[in-house]
Amino acid sequence: MSETPRIAIDAMGGDSGPAVMIAGAALARKEREDLAFILFGDEEAIRAELIRHPALASAVEIVHCTDVIAGTDKPSQAIRRAKTSSMGRAIAAVKDGTAHAMVSGGNTGAMMAMAKLALRTLPGIDRPALAALLPTLGDNDVVMLDLGANTECDTRNLIEFAVMGAAYARVVLELDRPRVQLLNIGTEELKGTDELKAAAAVLRDADYLHMRFDGFIEGDKLSRGGADVVVTDGFSGNIALKTVEGTARFVTDLIKRAFASSLRSKFGFLVSRPATRLLRHHLDPNNHNGAVFLGLGGLVVKSHGSANDIGVANAIGVAARMVSADITRRIGEDLANISAHNVPAAAQ
């Protein structure tokens, strides 16, 4: 797109509120000077943080909001406050075209509920999905979806997720034909639920799409780098995500404990510091921050609530890349291909 990407930011979202969200915006604009922001939240608190980032002041507009969605608020409660809360008004800015995308570190369930109500789903999409990047041992990260938006999915949902995930991978991973796999309890064609097997049958013959379907993948292979996109239902995806994140914390904590166990271990730490620094960087969730609600009629990005300024900047960067790449159009074109090739009734 030729015009300046405008990102609506829920400045009150996240564990640290305006301090981290605005610091992240400042960092993102250092990396990409054509960005502009609309900050939604308490104006006094926002201006107090902007003083720390004078270079950002010329690129922001502030919209004062008195209401904040808490992490404990139920989606039904949040929807009723969509017109007054910083999160709801930031989403509304995407709906009315004031902003091209929205970023928040707030309540995920509330964010999904408000975004789906305000932005609706794209034509041909039954349900939106939550997608994020996970680190791997390969040349690039892996896109995984759904990560919790839909606990139960049918065949059609899985096919749609594959299409959306591949479009997303083409943007963030810069791949022409991403390798797509379905998460399953085994790699054999006869294993898995009927929905998984039916989705695999459709995707296996979908050589007209901008992807390469590589069958099934098991959970222990997620980080090996053999897939660019992994598709699953939100129940399994959320468990897999939490398991990966927990394992990463376990490994880093175990290494810290091992290096502190003796004088010899501490000396070993000094020798291996470059390697441990690389490991810490690879496993740091801030370096992979920015989960995307794919399939909506507008761009919405979820930042980790505990993200630091680097994490928030990465989430903003994801939003900006999707705006520039016009990912909504790409998804629409691929969905049109699915419809044009008459997906079997069993996959509907």
Image (cartoon, rainbow, N blue to C red):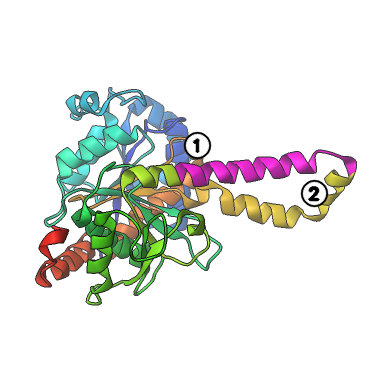
Left or right of 109? Residue 124 is left
Query: Which of the 4 quarters of the picture holds residue 332?
Result: bottom left
What is the x, y in percent for residue 122? 15, 54
| Cα gap from disc 1 to disc 2, whole angstroms | 36 Å
What is the x, y in percent for residue 275? 71, 57
**Which residue is denoted by mark 1 in the rendering?**
52
Residue type pointed to by label 2: Phe
Q: Please tell me which of labels 1 and 2 falls first in the chain.
A: 1
Which residue extends farthest front?
Answer: 190
Query: Which of the 4 quarters of the picture holds residue 238?
Result: top left
Residue type pointed to by label 1: Arg
Taking depth in this image into account, of 213 and 83 the one nearest to the observer is 213
Q: Residue at x 43, y 54 (%)?
A: 133
Which residue extends farthest bottom?
Answer: 207
- The residue segment tinted magenta is 241-263
Left or right of 222? Residue 259 is right
**Which residue is denoted by mark 2 in the rendering?**
269
What is the x, y in percent for residue 201? 25, 67
Q: Nearer the viewer, mark 1 or mark 2?
A: 2
Q: Residue at x 31, y 64 (%)?
A: 166
